[in-house]
Image: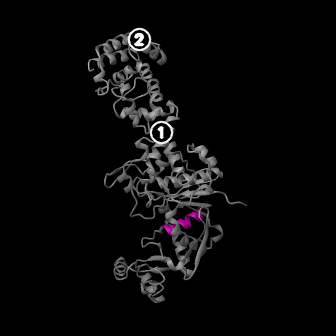
């Protein structure tokens, strides 16, 4: 019988959620939905020294904002819990003991000071085949010495005993056949002195306990794969081992290395899904949500970082991604992050989204700036007029604040030298021609008629009219603006501006 698809996203609650982490969650989610499977959120909090208060709730909030629905988690529960590794602490000791009993792991009693001294003594020191017998562990000590140390409750860690001259091979669904020489891999710690497992032991034990069928994780975990495969084998679970999918890295814009928070700070764009405030320092790191990105656009751009469906299509809803996603179309090569392209995705999503759906986010942006529209229907009109010009939600302020306030200043550089008293008379007359119920085309037609009657080319009057209403040389169709502002406001703005020309 075919194994039921069960996948997991297993972040550590140590801070903000990097866009690479969200992409990993997304690919897990898409694969689960496509195969009628289960998507699990498991919190890997075994490293208590790096635990950050509030990080878990933040991760949950990010996934919810993206529309990535979790089936089992610490919040929702499930039949395979607990879903926090710290709450599973008691379950790991038995596996460490089993590995020691079978000769695949050993006690290491080296103190931090002894390890530091060895690192200073030996260049590029690693704890493994070539050095383990010279260290203080159950391989170099006698049974009586080990028993005495254990009886005295001497602190120790448990390390895997990497075998000599073995080739650990497996099939990665993206990279194909992959092999590692065990002689080049050090003896990683499996159980720490505080009794908590490291990632290596915990991830294998939990994936087996939760019946995980496929492991989607970043390429940076590829060097750890042979350790995990050996643990699956040593613990007698080789036949239950999941399939492996190591996702390509998201690279810096220049392609040189993995994209980091530092790169975002340096280049002026976010790398976190949502704003993250460090509870210890109070430092704020900005996220895509608060910058003004739609979740649909954020998910869309993440999916295209390392995947495509083989066509020229670039805009995909979450439903379309679920339908078309395939592991076979994931690239082996890393994907460069391009913030301009990211803004393009958001622009396209804003442009193609109904004003009613955009209303809450745009309304919040305007409210933050003190602009409170009389009613939602008015703001919906404004949204429809200017959404084609906005890359992020905050652009609605720059592109539409004049709909709520008379321009504070006017860009007269281009019009002042050509201004004449006759043009002023034209606008005084045109203001009186504006009536309720006129459409933009009606207003434009009357504008042209009056201009021609006064001996002007309509084109030479259009820019002054725009500046009177907007303050500058931007915005949608000027007659659409006039209709949105209404008769009284349009007349008032013409009168106010004429005193400045």
Query: In the image, residue 430 lies at what x, y percent?
Result: 38, 12
Q: Is mark 1 on a helix, strand or loop?
A: helix
Query: In the image, residue 177 lies at what x, y percent?
Result: 61, 69
Query: In the image, residue 47 lies at what x, y percent?
Result: 43, 64
The answer to whether 369 is drawn above or below residue 501 in the figure is below
> Crowding near pointer 1: few (<14 within 10 Å), some, many (20+)?
many
Query: In the image, residue 34 lies at what x, y percent?
Result: 64, 50
The answer to whether 34 is drawn above or below residue 236 in the figure is above
| Residues in magenta, as a range | 199-211
Between the C-alphas of marks 2 and 1, the distance is 38 Å
| Residue 177 shown left or right of residue 130 in the figure | right
Q: What element carries label 2?
A: helix
Residue 389 among magenta residues:
no
Which residue does the numbered mark 1 point to in the structure image? 347
- Residue 450: numbered disc: 2
Q: Residue at x 29, y 26 (%)?
A: 412
Q: Residue at x 42, y 73 (%)?
A: 193
**Quadrant where the N terminus is found in the figure:** bottom right
Q: Which residue is drawn at 58% across and 80% down?
A: 166
User: Which sits earlier in the primary sequence, circle 2 or circle 1?
Assistant: 1
Residue 210 among magenta residues:
yes
């Amino acid at each position: 019988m075919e194994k039921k698809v069960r996948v997991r996203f297993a972040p550590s609650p140590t801070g903000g959620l990097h866009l690479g982490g969200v992409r990993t969650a997304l690919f897990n989610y898409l694969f689960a939905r496509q195969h009628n499977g289960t998507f699990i959120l498991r919190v890997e909090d075994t490293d208590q020294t790096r635990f950050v208060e509030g990080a878990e709730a933040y991760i949950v909030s990010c996934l919810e904002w993206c529309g990535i629905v979790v089936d089992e988690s610490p919040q929702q529960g499930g039949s395979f819990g607990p879903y926090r590794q710290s709450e599973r602490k008691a379950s790991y000791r038995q596996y460490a003991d089993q590995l020691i009993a079978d000769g695949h792991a050993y006690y290491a009693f080296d103190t931090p000071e002894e390890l530091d001294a060895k690192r200073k003594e030996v260049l590029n020191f690693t704890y493994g085949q070539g050095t383990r017998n010279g260290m203080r562990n159950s391989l170099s000590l006698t049974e009586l010495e080990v028993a005495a140390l254990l009886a005295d409750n001497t602190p120790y860690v448990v390390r895997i005993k990497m075998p000599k001259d073995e080739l650990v091979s497996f099939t990665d669904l993206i990279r194909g056949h992959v092999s590692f020489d065990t002689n080049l891999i050090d003896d990683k710690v499996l159980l720490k002195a505080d009794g908590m497992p490291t990632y290596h032991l915990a991830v294998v034990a939990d994936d087996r306990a939760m019946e995980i069928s496929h492991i989607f994780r970043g390429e940076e975990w590829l060097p750890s794969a042979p350790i995990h495969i050996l643990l699956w084998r040593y613990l007698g679970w080789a036949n239950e081992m999941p399939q492996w999918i190591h996702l390509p890295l998201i690279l810096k814009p220049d392609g040189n290395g993995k994209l980091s928070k530092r790169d975002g700070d340096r280049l002026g764009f976010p790398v976190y899904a949502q704003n993250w405030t460090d509870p210890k320092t109070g430092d704020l790191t900005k996220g895509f949500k608060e910058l003004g990105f739609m979740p649909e656009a954020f998910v869309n751009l993440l999916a295209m970082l390392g995947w495509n469906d083989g066509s020229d299509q670039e805009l995909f809803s979450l439903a379309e991604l679920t339908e078309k996603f395939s592991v076979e179309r994931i690239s082996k090569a890393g994907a460069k992050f391009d913030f301009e392209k990211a803004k393009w995705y958001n622009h396209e999503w804003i442009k193609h989204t109904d004003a009613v759906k955009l209303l809450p986010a745009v309304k919040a942006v305007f409210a933050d700036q003190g602009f409170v529209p009389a009613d939602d229907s008015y703001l919906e009109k404004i949204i429809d007029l200017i959404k084609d010009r906005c890359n992020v939600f905050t652009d609605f302020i720059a592109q539409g604040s004049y709909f709520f306030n008379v321009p504070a200043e006017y860009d007269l550089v281009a019009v002042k030298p050509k201004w004449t008293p006759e043009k002023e008379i034209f606008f005084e007359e045109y203001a009186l021609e504006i009536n309720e119920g006129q459409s933009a085309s009606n207003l434009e037609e009357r504008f042209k008629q009056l201009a021609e009657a006064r001996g002007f080319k309509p084109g030479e009057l259009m820019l002054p009219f725009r500046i009177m209403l907007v303050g500058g040389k931007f915005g949608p169709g000027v007659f659409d603006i006039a209709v949105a502002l209404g008769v009284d406001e349009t007349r008032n703005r013409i009168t106010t501006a004429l005193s400045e020309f």
